Image (cartoon, coloured by chain):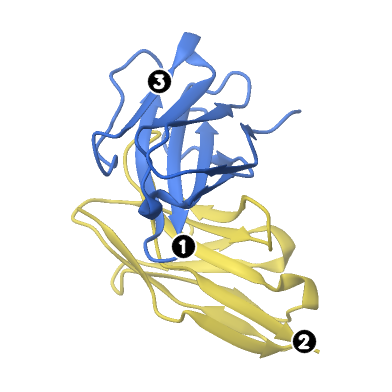
Chain colours: A yellow, B blue
Amino acid sequence: AQSVTQLDSQVPVFEEAPVELRCNYSSSVSVYLFWYVQYPNQGLQLLLKYLSGSTLVKGINGFEAEFNKSQTSFHLRKPSVHISDTAEYFCAAGRAAGNKLTFGGGTRVLVKP
Amino acid sequence: GAGVSQSPSNKVTEKGKDVELRCDPISGHTALYWYRQSLGQGLEFLIYFQGNSAPDKSGLPSDRFSAERTGGSVSTLTIQRTQQEDSAVYLCASSSGLAGGTQYFGPGTRLTVL
């Protein structure tokens, strides 16, 4: 069984400041890792994913994440946030081809002017 | 191209009634998933279809929940004898079915059971 933990349920941050959203996973097998974003009243949109190879993954909208196998983490970062980054962010893990995703509890980011 | 679509966008029903939720996946995607998003439980996997294989039903919370996928495309999630705890947003996603393939989500159906 696998589980995903997002350590912060809410993260307030000022505009143009950096943000880091923490995600830890546990799994007895290799996993694929994803970050999704959900804007208010919208569906989930993929930000980035890690399958293999380089541990630093770059995604859309200036986000990046680093896979750390020894710490079983996949933290998401953005060096300078905008008001439009206000949303809920979900970390997820999957295993074999096309398999189901296990989601973390989500982190709500509120960007303040 | 067109994304994943779901209907209805909102459904209000009375306790004890049956409901059907529909999902149209992205054309050509062989894998289809249903998830549920609720305040108390977060995002939970419900069921997964891959091609002609038997579906993975391991996430269905009770035997009141069932789903089918006709012709390898459209899927319907049926909830019988709805309960108030079934109130949630039901999300459908589809993917190519390849390893690590991105799951593309629909906008969801918000179900409210009175």
**What element does badge 3 sit on?**
strand
Q: Looking at the picture, does residue A63 appear above or below residue B70?
A: below
Circle 3 residue: B68
Marks 2/3: CA–CA distance:
46 Å
Task: Residue type at mark 2: give it.
Answer: Glu
What residue sits 61% from the left and 83% below the top? A19
Q: Quadrant of residue A18?
A: bottom right
Residue that carries the numbered disc 1 in the rendered image? A91
Nearest to the eye among marks 1 and 3: give it: 3
Which one is in front in this view, the residue at disc 2 or the one at disc 3? Answer: 3
Query: Residue flagged by tag 3: what amino acid is it?
Result: Glu
The location of residue B7, given as percent across then percent down, is 63, 32
Q: Secondary structure at mark 1?
A: strand
Q: Chain of mark 1?
A: A
Which residue is label 2 attached to? A15
Q: Is residue B54 above or below residue A62?
A: above
Expressed as whole percent of the image width and height from the top left, the position of residue B86 reads 39, 49
* Residue B57, visible in the rendered structure: yes
| Residue A27, x across and y down, in percent | 23, 58
Specify the subunit that label 2 lies on.
A
Dot 1 amino acid type: Cys
Both marks 1 and 3 on one chain: no
Instruction: Give x and y (percent) for residue A42.
Output: 68, 54
For the residues tagged 2 and 3, is the chain the same? Answer: no
Q: On the picture, is A43 further left or further right than B103? A: right
Front one among B90 and A33? B90
Residue B97 in view: no
